[in-house]
């Protein structure tokens, strides 16, 4: 079983929809959680970074961590065609350790 | 240059050939990483380096070697390429191990 599970999709939504992207994990030691966005034929880039449980908002993006359920989410409000990309979750147990990545979810936002 | 660069952008290689993928960063980051990305498997860590002069094995190190002679460069070598090494390879760097990683544009490698 993978340490981090992420539905690869593909996920297709109309412009303006609210998107929910999720990851589950098995290692209860994970404390630092990240979301990376990867456009086609490009390298991933950091989108959101959270520590422990709770919510973090940045513009149209909200990252949510539920450590009791070992479940993290990324919400995109008012989705735009420019949000079309693959979204990868990543996490590590301490700030000085290697990241474990999810497989990535491919999202398409249709105009 | 600004950020992290990789070369070549893409390469087709005959099985059994030796190949070195180049990675250079100009951010003075201590940590550097090599990943491969495959459909259905996501990003998998091949090798990493905490700082110049040190390297470590990741999740899938077999068939690959790295060196870290200085802060900026982190080449990945395939000593004798096999078709299963066909993949997209990403180099990344971070200020310290576990910090935000900055990725290069990737190298698409096909081994025939």
Image (cartoon, coloured by chain):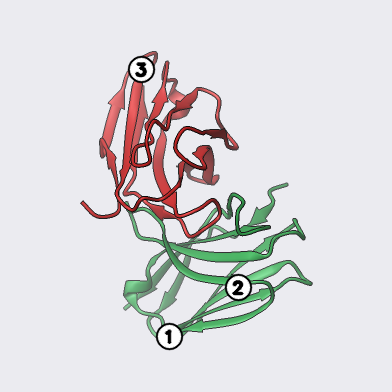
Chain in green colour: A
Residue B61: x, y in percent? Answer: 55, 30
A95 or A17, nearer to the observer: A95
Q: Quadrant of residue A84?
A: bottom left
Q: Which residue carries the number 2 mark? A: A73
Residue under the image location 56 percent in, 81 percent down: A56
Q: CA distance from mark 2 to mark 3?
A: 42 Å
Q: Is residue A84 left or right of residue A95?
A: left
Rendered colour, chain B: red
Residue A28: x, y in percent? Answer: 77, 60
- Give the number of the mark in front: 2 or 3: 3
Q: CA distance from mark 1 to mark 2?
A: 16 Å
Chain containing mark 2: A
First reached walking from the N terminus: tag 1 or tag 2: 1
Residue under the image location 68 percent in, 65 percent down: A31
Q: Is residue B67 left or right of residue B107?
A: right
Q: Is residue A28 above or below residue B79?
A: below
Residue B8: x, y in percent? Answer: 25, 35
Q: Residue furthest left?
A: B1
B36 or A14, nearer to the observer: B36
1 and 2 marks on the same chain: yes
Q: Quadrant of residue B79?
A: top left
Q: Is residue B16 above or below residue B86?
A: above
Q: Which residue carries the number 1 mark? A: A59
Chain containing mark 1: A
Label 2, secondary structure: give it: strand
Q: Which residue carries the number 3 mark? A: B18
């Amino acid at each position: 079983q993978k340490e981090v599970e992420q539905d690869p999709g593909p996920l297709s939504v109309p412009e303006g929809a609210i998107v929910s992207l999720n990851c589950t994990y098995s290692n209860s030691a994970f404390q630092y959680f990240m979301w990376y966005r990867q456009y086609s034929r490009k390298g991933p880039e950091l989108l959101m970074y959270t520590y422990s449980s709770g919510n973090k908002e940045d513009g149209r993006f909200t990252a949510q961590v539920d450590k009791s359920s070992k479940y993290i989410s990324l919400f995109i409000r008012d989705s735009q065609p420019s949000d079309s990309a693959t979204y990868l979750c990543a996490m590590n147990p301490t700030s000085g350790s290697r990241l474990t990545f999810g497989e990535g979810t491919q999202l398409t936002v249709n105009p | 240059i600004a950020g992290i660069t990789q070369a070549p952008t893409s390469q087709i290689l005959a099985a059994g050939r030796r190949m070195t993928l180049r990675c250079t960063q100009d951010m003075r980051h201590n940590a550097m990483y090599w990943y491969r990305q495959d459909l259905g498997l996501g990003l998998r860590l091949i090798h990493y380096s905490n700082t110049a002069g040190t390297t470590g094995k990741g999740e899938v190190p077999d068939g690959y070697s790295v060196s870290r002679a200085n802060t900026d460069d982190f080449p990945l070598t395939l000593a004798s390429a096999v078709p299963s090494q066909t993949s997209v390879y990403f180099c990344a760097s971070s200020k310290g191990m576990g910090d935000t990683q900055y990725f290069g544009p990737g190298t698409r490698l096909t081994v025939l």
